[in-house]
Amino acid sequence: MSRVFLCSITCFDADGALDLTAQSALFERAARAGVGLYVGSASPGEGHALRPEETDALLRAAVAAAGGRVSVRAMGVEPRSAAQMIEFLELAGGTGVDAAQIYSLDMGHGGQPTPAELESYFRRAIESTGLPVALSSHMYNGYLVPPEMIERLAADYPHLIAVNATTPDVPYLSELLERVRGRLEVCVGGPMHALTALGMGGDGYLCTEAALIPERCAALGRHFERGEIEKAAAAHADVLRWMRTLGCVSGMSVRRTKAAMTVFGLPGTGLREPHAPLDPEEIETLREALRNAGLRAEVPPDA
């Protein structure tokens, strides 16, 4: 399996239309580096701004560009109900993706589901599809899925294959791994704890930086697999340097990533509401920050 997955941005042109040419080129760069794909996500993928037919086209483009070389997975957005998640899984099931993520339930208004409500939601979603599925336990939902619940679900559903945990809570990750290691693929969200997770027996990490430096992101996992810990640590430091440097652009990760793509001349960097368009001052601030840090994107000659 891939040790790293790209949480992909969605490429739009200057008018906000889906740019499948730029999108396919991005998928190709990731696949060439051995980086798996999660597509149509909430934060970097602007998934809430996509119409169902656009999500369908996006997933099909990912399969066409990278299918058979790396794992191509539908990511989707946080749902308010099992019915919403089931609709997304039905859509994804017709596109040829290898798997789909089931996000944790977002009750709205800052509310959190009871354990019984959450488990019922997951079971309804999992049972609605024959696709291999991954669960998301994400701190930005305001709670984490109890590890013992994930263990129960893993025991009951063979097509539950993975869990993506996004949290700085290392003891939580430790318990999760103890309960499901060997049964589920466990990845962490973001590069922050990538090397920690691998060292604890996890399987990899998800990030947006792979849109810019897919080879370097993949190198972290490859060096770790070979026991080249110093090289893995150096690759990890590089990825984190990118993450810190991109942080000079305000807003969510999609704005930072698309600003860097603009700096390096990559297409598909339009944004949709509610994200504000990138302005020239932001681009120049980031250009200078990247220059000062000595960072360059891995841009192929034909890009």
Image: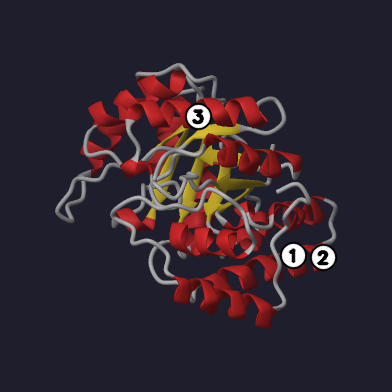
Identify whether 252 is placed above or below 114. Answer: below
Query: In screen coordinates, is 88 left or right of 170?
Result: left
Q: In which quadrant of the rendered view does residue 182 lie?
A: top right
**Residue pointed to by mark 3:** 59
Q: In which quadrant of the rendered view does residue 79 lie?
A: top left
Q: Tag 1: Cα neighbours inside 10 Å, few (<14), some, or many (≥20)? A: many
Residue at horizontal 59 percent and vertical 74 percent from the top:
287
Judging depth in this view, the residue of 160 and 14 nearest the camera is 14
The span from disc 2 to disc 1 (Cα, nearest Å) is 6 Å
* Disc on the earlier residue, 2 or 3: 3
**Residue pointed to by mark 2:** 231
**Looking at the picture, how far across and down is residue 229, in whole percent?**
80, 64
* Disc on the earlier residue, 3 or 1: 3
Q: Residue furthest left?
A: 109
Determine whether the residue tagged by mark 3 lies in a helix, strand or loop: helix
Tell me the quadrant of the picture where the N terminus can be found.
Answer: top right
The kind of residue tagged 1 is Ala
Residue at horizontal 47 percent and vertical 46 percent from the top:
13
Identify whether 99 is placed above or below 146. Answer: above
Judging depth in this view, the residue of 247 and 87 nearest the camera is 247
Query: In screen coordinates, is 121 left or right of 211?
Result: left
Identify whether 79 is placed above or below 301. Answer: above
Residue at horizontal 73 percent and vertical 41 percent from the top:
34
Judging depth in this view, the residue of 257 and 190 nearest the camera is 257
**Residue pointed to by mark 1:** 235
Determine whether the residue tagged by mark 2 lies in a helix, strand or loop: helix
- Mark 2 or 3: in front is 3
